[in-house]
Image: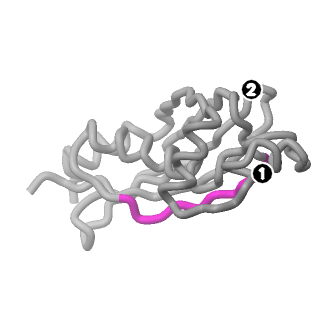
Amino acid sequence: MARSMATEQYQALIGESFSKEVHFDASGIAEFARLCGDTNPLHHDPTYAAGSRFGGIIASGPQVTSLMMAMVADFLASRGPGVGLGFNFRLRSAVRAGEVVTMRWRITGVKEKRSLGGHVIALEGEAVRPDGTTAVAATGEVLGMDAP
């Protein structure tokens, strides 16, 4: 059975990568935490955070990971309809207020999934702090939906 044109297009994505730099400032960190209901003083209270092992305000894990997932959604949406299927994140190092973090993803595989009406796209990602430390390591799967 011949592969569809959609399969060829999806297969061509393997190895493609995309990235962006994100600036984390104290007010944005506090606002994100507040909107999520996260009352951890490491995200809100400069005096408390300064006395912690982090030495200052840090971003919450959900803030960093949601921005990473949004990057994938944006990448997929620019190519057609799709939905996330699952992500795994490993929080390795805190992201400090004032840092510019490089977030990047690479497509590592594509499998046709007829039962879902599209192609499962596998990705590996990371968020890297300015000193080269990996703050977050990630894997994910998204569904690129075939045109009807």
Report the residue that reaches farthest toward the bottom: 115
Q: Is residue 108 visible?
A: no
Q: Position of residue 61 (x, y in %)?
A: 64, 54
Is there CB contact under 8 Å for labels 2 and 1?
no
Q: Give the side of residue 143 with respect to residue 35, left or right.
A: left
Q: For the magenta stretch, what is the residue range?
A: 84-93
Report the residue marked by disc 1.
92
Q: Position of residue 143 (x, y in %)?
A: 33, 58
Q: Position of residue 116 (x, y in %)?
A: 26, 69
- Could you tell me which secondary element the residue under label 2 belongs to? loop
In this figure, which colouring scheme has been used for the structure?
one colour
Q: Give the side of residue 138 with respect to residue 92, left or right.
A: left
Determine if the magenta segment contains residue 74: no
Question: Is residue 8 positioned above or below 130 on the image?
Answer: below
Question: Is residue 86 positioned above or below 102 on the image?
Answer: below
Observer-nearest of 2 and 103? 103
Specify the principal SS of the magenta part: strand
Q: Residues within 10 Å of mark 1 (few under 14, many from 20)?
A: few
Determine if the magenta segment contains residue 91: yes
* Amino acid type, mark 1: Arg
Report the residue marked by disc 2.
130
* Amino acid type, mark 2: Pro
Placement of the C terminus among the 4 image quadrants: bottom left
